[in-house]
Image: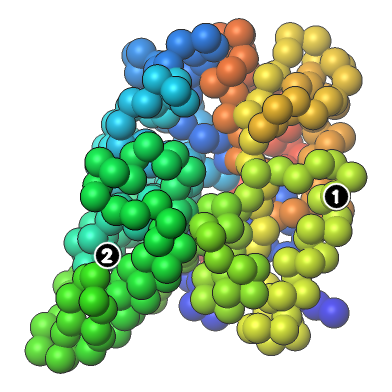
Amino acid sequence: MTMTLDLRFESHPGFRRLFAPGHLTIGLIMPLETYPGRPGPTMNGHLEMARLADSSALGALWMRDIPFYDPHYGDVGQVFESLIYISALSAVTTSITLGTAGIILPFREPKILAKQVMSLDHLSDGRMVLGLSSGDRPAEYPIFDIDYSTRGERFRDAFNVYKSISENDFPTFFSSRFGKSEGTHDLIPKAAFEQVPSIAVGRSQQSLDWIARHMDGLLVPSPPVSSIKSFVTEWQTHVRETSGSRSFKPLGIAGYLDLVEDRDYPFEAIRSGFRSGSRTLASFLEVARDAGVNHVAFNPSISRRPYTDIMDNIIEDILPYFPALSSKS
C-alpha cells in the first residue's frame, strides 16, 4: 500500500529535506568534532564545519539537550544550549535541516518552548524539526525539583500544552503543572509553514501507540541489525492503526559511529552504535532503507580520526546514494 506525506508537511522545508516514503537520508548529531576519551569538544571551527555540512547533500544537523555536565555520563554534547545553538547555525547555513535530538520536555516550560520553536522556525526559513525526549539521566531530575518517576506523565502534560498553544489561535487549556488559558491570549508567531514537525526521540516513557497517534515521527537508538525490519513493521502497524491506512510517519535510527580509515572495513555493531568503513556503511544503509528506515543520525564523536576526514568519506561514499531530498514542494 502506498503511503502519503502528511499535508501539513508538504511545504515544510525541514521535514521535506529528510523524510519521504521509500527514501533514507543522513544526519549528523552535533558537535562536528571528534573527542574520544574526553567529556567535551573544543567547538573550534564549528561554524565552518556546519557550513561544509550545509553545502553537501547531508540532510540534518541534530542538537542534543544536555543541561549539565555529569561526570558519571561523561559527555556534554555540543556544549551550547540546543535552541540557542540552532539560532546561530541558522544564520550561517541555508538549506540543511536543524533539529533537536531531543529537547528534554519534562524540564521545559511548554509555553516558552512554543515561543522559542516558532521563532526558530521563522528565523531558519522553516528548517526546524523538534525532537522531544523524556531524558535518560536520573541524577538531573532533583536539580529541577522533579520526580523522575513522573517524567512520562509530565512529558504528555507538557506536550499537550505545547501543541495547544503553538497550533491554535487563542487556545484554551488547563494543566495542573503548566497553567491554564481561557482563550484570552494568543501566541505570536505561529509556525512559518503551517506546523513544526515534532518527533519522539526514544520512546519518552510512552507507548508506540501513543507516539504514533500524537507525534509526527520517531527517532530511536538503532535496534540490532537483525531486528530493524521487525521494528519498522511494528512502527508502521501502529501508524496505520492510529492515523490511517495510508499515513506516513517517518522512522529514524541513531547511534555512535566509529568510521575507520579503511573504507572497506567490515560493518559491525558496537555499544550504542556502529564501527565501519565508509563503503561498507553504505551497504548497511541500503539494507536499512529497504527495511523501511527513513533517516539515520550518526554521532562520530567517538572516532579517533579528524572530523574533516570523516566528512570527506561521508560526502564521497555515502551521500551520493542517500542524499537529502528536495526541500521545496
Residue 188 rendering spot, x and y as whole percentages? 17, 72
Q: Is residue 285 left or right of residue 79?
A: right
Residue 44 seen anywhere in this rendered image of the structure: yes
* Residue at horizontal 86 percent and vertical 55 percent from the top: 229
Q: Residues within 10 Å of mark 1 (few under 14, many from 20)?
A: few
Up the image or down, 230 lies above or below 271; here it is: below
Query: Split into 4 quadrants, where in the image is the C terminus?
Result: bottom right
What is the quadrant of residue 317 in the picture? Answer: top right
SS at badge 2: helix
Q: Amino acid at mark 2?
A: Pro
Which corner quadrant of the image does residue 20 belong to?
bottom right
Q: What amino acid type should be assigned to the residue bearing mark 1?
A: Ser
Residue at (40% x, 20% y) in the render? 71
Residue 122 falls left or right of residue 182 = right
Estimate the x, y position of residue 134 in percent, counting from the top left.
45, 54
Q: Residue 4 is drawn in which quadrant?
A: bottom right
Whether 126 is drawn above or below 286: the answer is: below
Q: CA distance from mark 2 to mark 1?
A: 35 Å
Name the residue located 59 percent from the left edge and 18 percent from the top edge.
Answer: 302
**Which residue position is annotated with label 2?**
110
At a point 65% along the width and 68% down the height, the residue shown is: 208
Q: Quadrant of the N terminus?
A: bottom right
Return the residue nearer the eye: 275 or 51. Answer: 275
Residue density around tag 2, few if under 14, some if 14–19, many if 20 or more, within 10 Å:
many
Could you tell me which secondary element the residue under label 1 belongs to? helix
Q: Position of residue 100 (x, y in %)?
A: 43, 48
| Residue ID for mark 1 | 227
Residue 2 image position (x, y, % from top left): 80, 77
185 left or right of 69? left
Disc assigned to residue 306: none
Indicate which disc, 2 or 1, sits on the residue closer to the N terminus.
2
Q: Is residue 47 something that shows in the picture? A: no
